Image (cartoon, rainbow, N blue to C red):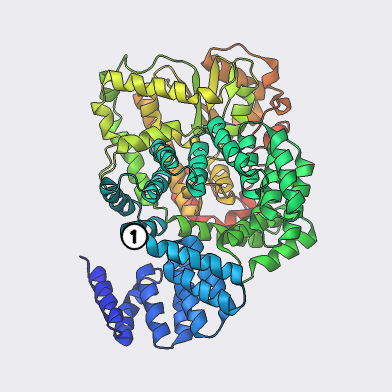
Amino acid sequence: MSNRDEILARAQKALQASDFAGGLALVEPLVAADPADGDALYMAAVAARYLKRYPEAERHLAALHAAMPEYGRAWQEAGHLARARGDNAAAVAAYGRAARFNPALEASWRALAELETAAGHSAQAQAASAQAQRIAQLPRELVAVTHHLHEGRLLRAEEICRHFLRANPKNVEGMRLLAQIGIKLGILDDAEFLLDSAKTFEPDNVQVRLDYIDALRRRQKFETARGEAEALYARDPENPLFQSHLAIESMQTGDYDQAFTLFDAILEKLPDDPATLTSRGHALKTTGAQEDAVASYRAAVAAKPDHGDAWYALANLKTYRFEDGEIARMRAEVERADLAFMDRVHLSFALGKALEDRGEYEESFAQYERGNDLKRAQTRYSADAMSAELAKQKTECTPELFERHAGAGHAASDPIFILGLPRAGSTLLEQILASHSQIDGTLELPNILALAHRLRGRKAGQSRYPEILHNLTAEQLTAFGAKFIEDTRIHRQDAPFFIDKMPNNFRHIGLIHLILPNAKIIDARRAPMDCCFSGFKQLFAEGQEFTYGLTEIGRYYADYVDLMDQWDTVLPGKVLRVQHEDVLDDLEGQTRRMLDYLGLPFEEQCLAFHKTERAVRTASSEQVRQPINRSGQDAWKPYDPWLGPLREALGNLAGPVSAS
């Protein structure tokens, strides 16, 4: 046990013994040494509250919220503090956040029930009381699992949950929680199996069925997910929740007519529902109806001015320009002390884009930085851990490995992997190639990442991947390749070739080559400063945690270049590198070069890619519907005064400092 851990343990005992002054004295030096030490800040806040040193407790909680914005216990403590000060409205808001970030916090639900009862809100009080009772009736092991799950200790949560299920193999809540852990760890096939089994045991458990739909969607089993959503909808066709889920799953299967019909039905009952208006906007955007999408997003923010998701959706169109009044409204909302965490994140990124378009670069950068700081605190991404993970690929994926497995793997030549970093131009390359009669564009498919997760194994801190690649048999490699082809068939139309555009697959080129030796791989690369700053400006729906900091994204780009050099060395000629700037300079030449690499004849429609009608779900969806342009080139230059950390992380890759 480290010295810090010993101090925290002593402080915990002091608080349990009601020695609040002693506990506070123990943790104060830890807070001074590390102002973002969540454990020390939490104990300091609790001790200060009991000592009635309320301003001090509030300072500790503010620092704790900044360091761990979705830590439920911190918000529960904020509720206790507000209640001690007699501010019941603030207490209700804090307890509500606590329960949202960690639904197993029984004290928060009980406090909500008491406060809502006192305020005469009987329905809310009954709902909170029911949640408190549900938690009280859960096995203590599952309460502990829920705490660990929602506080980021996934491996510990998994360990406890598996131990519980060995003794209680048909406990549906245990199965559901283990599936949630699996989803967070990327082990989606296990999650699907668990939820399918849980659904069999309790077919009327709506939460299990909703979780099952979510798992199926994440596995991109869109038809099956839609079938499950239709079954829920058939139970109660007037239920807006069921209507919404069926609308979303209909979108995923390309049935936008049904999606729009369902969205309209919801809006007839709930005309100002911001979530539905935003989802409808996403559907309109995906189908290319940009004006209607804008109208739907604007209706959402008119109904709920702090609905950050819709504000960011407008910014994320890339082509939308905010009016002065809209910017003033966003500025007012983002400064609200009671603004929800993700609304603040969304609004910060949206304001960054709005101010960039006006040429107000200093304030624009401040907003982008604020949004990134919030997301980085939420994700707790470690650049050191990622560098170590990528370095293992270099160590293990040697020429000897590929020589030993020569001739193994599935012989299919169907897949075309376009990979690299997000915001590097991969969507443009996909749109060009998917315009070819012999190539299907699909999605960013999770299959390779899921296989890599599975190969890691499940022992805490003992990943077997990529070392395990040395021990796989020819039969296993062939089976993995065949499974990839079979599992991705659902996304294809009738073309002989198809694209998997998951950018992070660059980490696993060795695995791809071993299981699919005839697959083609295209590295979509963009100038470092352009690529990194574009990623820094982008708020991703999920994943891509390395983008939320200039140092982090610069290191990731440098590690990516280093690893791609390794692939070029050990698998010479395997990867075709396509530089984004070369495509801008010579669209036809680079298109012919890609098609030559793929062994396909040139087709003129590839040059008219912006006229190809297909649903595009990435952040570049509007840009690839326009003729080729240079609007994103050198977009970092006005921000150069603030990009020192990025330059330092990139090193020689950053190039010369631009002239002021």
**Residue 537 spot, x, y in % from top left:** 59, 50
Task: Indicate the quadrant containing the C terminus: top left, top right, bottom left or bottom right.
Answer: bottom right
The crowd level at tag 1 (other Cα within 10 Å; few <14, some 14-19, many 20+) is: some
Front position in the image: 503 or 101: 101
Q: Position of residue 124 (x, y in %)?
A: 58, 68
Residue 628 against residue 320 in the figure, above or below: above
**What residue do we see at 64% from left, 39% from top?**
620
Q: Amino acid at mark 1?
A: Ala
Q: Is residue 593 visible?
A: no
Nearer-the-camera pick, 202 or 449: 202
Is 458 positioned to the left or the right of 218 in the image?
A: left
Q: Where's the N terminus, which quadrant?
A: bottom left
Residue 235 location, quadrant: top right
Residue at image location 64% in from the left, 45% down from the top: 244
Q: Is residue 122 visible?
A: yes
From the viewer's perspective, is residue 287 above or below residue 366? above
The one of 237 and 381 positioned closer to us in this rendering: 237
Does residue 179 appear to the left or right of 439 in the view shown?
left
Q: Which residue is mark 1?
A: 144
Q: Position of residue 342 (x, y in %)?
A: 57, 58
- Along the horizontal axis of the image, is 474 left or right of 650? left
| Residue 64 screen position, x and y as percent | 44, 70
Corner quadrant of residue 388: top left
